[in-house]
Image (tube, grey):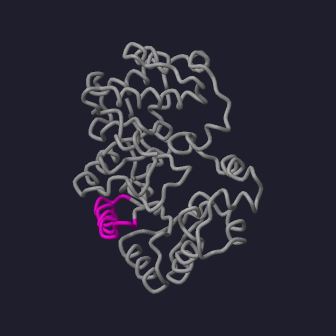
């Protein structure tokens, strides 16, 4: 049972202007364009306050793809007396200084006090540095506090043409053939979602039984709350367990196994029990093996969804997470 919450984030939308290779949530242009509703936001903010969470960062997807939706999100958070730690943006919405400064003013008027601007090789495959710099300049001119994520890559990107995007293949010709691998090592990625798919070829593989033997007992990650997220559908997502979800209304309660069969099995008995359960449903091991417990878990969950007559489970999703690449 989850009794306390800390360091939370709100995913207003999974729709994004980029399909970054490192994205934990597999956001992208093909994802559902829905935005968090007022009812869902008020509900999860009030529920989150019960175990102690009174501040959140806002991210996506790209939150500013729906400006009016974001503005209303900020207004509701202010009405509910919930603090916005910072707003994440990839700067793809930037057009010119005048309009960007107006956006920053609109954000400030609704209680946003800090903007996080993504500046890294993953984003530069889709967004020119000039747009990122434009948002930085707009923040500076309008006295909006900001920080760059991650600033260590600014020098690299500034050495390239600021006005266009650059693939990792192109960056590798400038910075060395192992640039993608080295970027992953330096970034401090959570190895799940699209990041896991990107870096799986570089990682050692193990048989399922080896992973199970190294990870006996319950999966405690299912109830971790350091940097958790609530998404637009009202789901609580543990920081390392993307693809698993618990509706905010069920937090603080004993979760029924009938409603959350996969989540509770992992939480109570671990990856070994989840693997045994999958095998009774016909799951076959990947020939190349797996790179981690999370890799094995994600493959099993995808198999369950793909091979169920009615592939809709309260605890596995969103469905697009498993179909998006």
Q: Position of residue 204 (x, y in %)?
A: 68, 30
Task: Assign the N terminus to one quadrant of the image.
Answer: top left
Residue at 59%, 72% (x, y): give it: 164
Where residue 155 sits, quadrant-wise, is bottom right
Q: Main secondary structure of the magenta part?
A: helix
Q: Is residue 210 left or right of residue 73?
A: right
Where residue 283 sits, quadrant-wise, is top left
Residue at 44%, 52% (x, y): give it: 27
Residue 121 among magenta residues? no
- The residue range painted magenta reads 64-82
Where residue 36 sits, quadrant-wise, is bottom left
Q: Position of residue 307 (x, y in %)?
A: 34, 26
Q: Is residue 279 above or below residue 92?
A: above
Q: Position of residue 42 (x, y in %)?
A: 26, 54
- For this rendering, which residue is in front, 139 or 172? 172
Q: Is residue 232 above or below residue 204?
A: below
Q: Is residue 286 above or below residue 109?
A: above
């Amino acid at each position: 049972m989850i009794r306390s919450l800390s360091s939370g984030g709100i995913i207003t939308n999974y729709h994004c202007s980029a399909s970054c290779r490192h994205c934990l949530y597999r956001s992208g242009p093909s994802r559902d364009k829905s935005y968090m509703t007022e009812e869902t936001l008020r509900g999860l903010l009030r529920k989150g306050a019960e175990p102690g969470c009174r501040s959140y960062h806002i991210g996506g997807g790209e939150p500013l793809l729906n400006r009016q939706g974001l503005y209303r999100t900020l207004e509701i958070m202010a009405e509910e007396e919930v603090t916005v730690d910072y707003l994440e943006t990839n700067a793809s919405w930037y057009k010119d200084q005048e309009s960007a400064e107006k956006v920053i003013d609109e954000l400030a008027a609704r209680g946003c006090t800090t903007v996080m601007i993504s500046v890294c090789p993953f984003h530069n495959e889709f967004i020119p540095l000039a747009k990122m710099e434009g948002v930085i300049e707009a923040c500076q001119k309008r006295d909006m506090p900001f920080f760059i994520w991650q600033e260590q890559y600014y020098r690299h990107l500034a050495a390239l043409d600021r006005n266009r995007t650059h693939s990792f293949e192109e960056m590798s010709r400038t910075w060395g053939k192992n640039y993608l691998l080295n970027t992953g090592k330096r970034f401090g990625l959570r190895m799940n979602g699209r990041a896991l798919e990107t870096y799986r070829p570089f990682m050692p593989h193990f048989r399922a039984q080896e992973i199970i033997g190294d990870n006996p007992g319950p999966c405690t990650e299912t109830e971790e709350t350091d940097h958790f997220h609530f998404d637009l559908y009202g789901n609580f997502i543990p920081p390392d367990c993307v693809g698993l979800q618990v509706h905010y209304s069920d937090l603080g309660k004993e979760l029924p196994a009938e409603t959350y069969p996969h989540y509770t099995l992992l939480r109570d008995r671990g990856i070994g029990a989840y693997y045994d359960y999958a095998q009774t449903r016909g799951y076959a091991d990947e020939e190349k093996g797996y790179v981690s417990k999370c890799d094995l878990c994600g493959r099993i969950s995808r198999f369950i969804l793909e091979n169920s007559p009615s592939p809709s489970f309260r605890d596995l999703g969103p469905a697009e997470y498993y179909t998006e690449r």
